[in-house]
Image (spheres, rainbow, N blue to C red):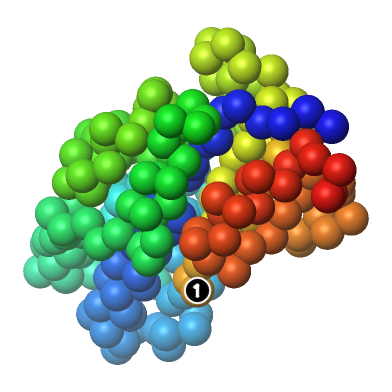
Amino acid sequence: MQRPELIAFDADDTLWHNERFFRLTQDRFAALLADHAPREHLGERLLAAERRNLGHYGFGIKGFVLSMIETAIEVTDGRVPAPVIAELIAAGQEMLRHPIELLPHARETLIALKGTYRILLITKGDLLDQERKLAQSGLGDFFDGVEIVSHKTAGVYADIFRRHGTRPTEAVMVGNSLRSDILPVLRIGGWGVHVPHELTWELERDEPPRAHSRFLALNTLEELAAVLRTIGTDDR
């Protein structure tokens, strides 16, 4: 079994907090529209809007705000007050300004791996927002390459690894999303290391492929460096 030489990391909710800010804004959204629909119903309608809008807006805060506005219009039968729309826009702008909070062990893990492996950041979403978060994180110097993509598919990962001179069998992808970070990489022969986050967006959830020989599940990033040393050895 071949030892990996490239380690790729997801960013949002793998290296720094992200989903918590979406949840806080969604709570604000529910409070604004409490007179028009119950919280649970609003959540279902918003998720449905986000699902159908992914092909138009992609992932990220801007698409989330547009989906909130669309849902507000729908549940009020077009009578949503202008101040509510203004507050939803303001909430999105606050999200785009929110300072980055690193997850535990993120920096220490990158320090431990730097120099032993080539390290990539592979993240999806709005280009400007992802660039802002990376700059604020202070982690940029740890990466040998940064890839900001619209979607994470098997083909996208294969293209990235090829451009960086690595075969999928020599690559490891580390992330919190089974659907985006793990399953596509397993499909092309790479390793997938799942590090769950306490908050996971519904559209990023999937069943863990526990029987797959190249799937690994950790509790925290702190375990990653030791686990990587076992890949490709007789201990696995």
The three-letter code of the residue at mark 1 reads Glu
Residue at point 49%, 83% (across, down): 40
Q: Nearer the viewer, residue 125 or 55?
A: 125
Q: Is residue 198 left or right of residue 153?
A: left
Residue 8 seen in this snapshot:
yes
Tell me which corner region of the image, top left, top right, bottom left or bottom right, holds residue 228.
top right
Residue 224 horizontal/vertical position (percent): 57, 54
Q: Is residue 176 above or below residue 171?
A: below
Give above or below for 14 relative to 124: below
Quadrant hosting residue 166: top right
- How would you rate the neighbour count of disc 1 (Cα within 10 Å): few for under 14, some for 14-19, many for 20 or more? few
> What residue is rendered at 33% in x and 52% in y?
107
In this picture, residue 232 sits left or right of residue 156? right
| Residue 190: percent from left, percent from top | 72, 33
Q: Position of residue 51 (x, y in %)?
A: 54, 52
Q: How many marks?
A: 1
Q: Which residue is mark 1?
A: 198
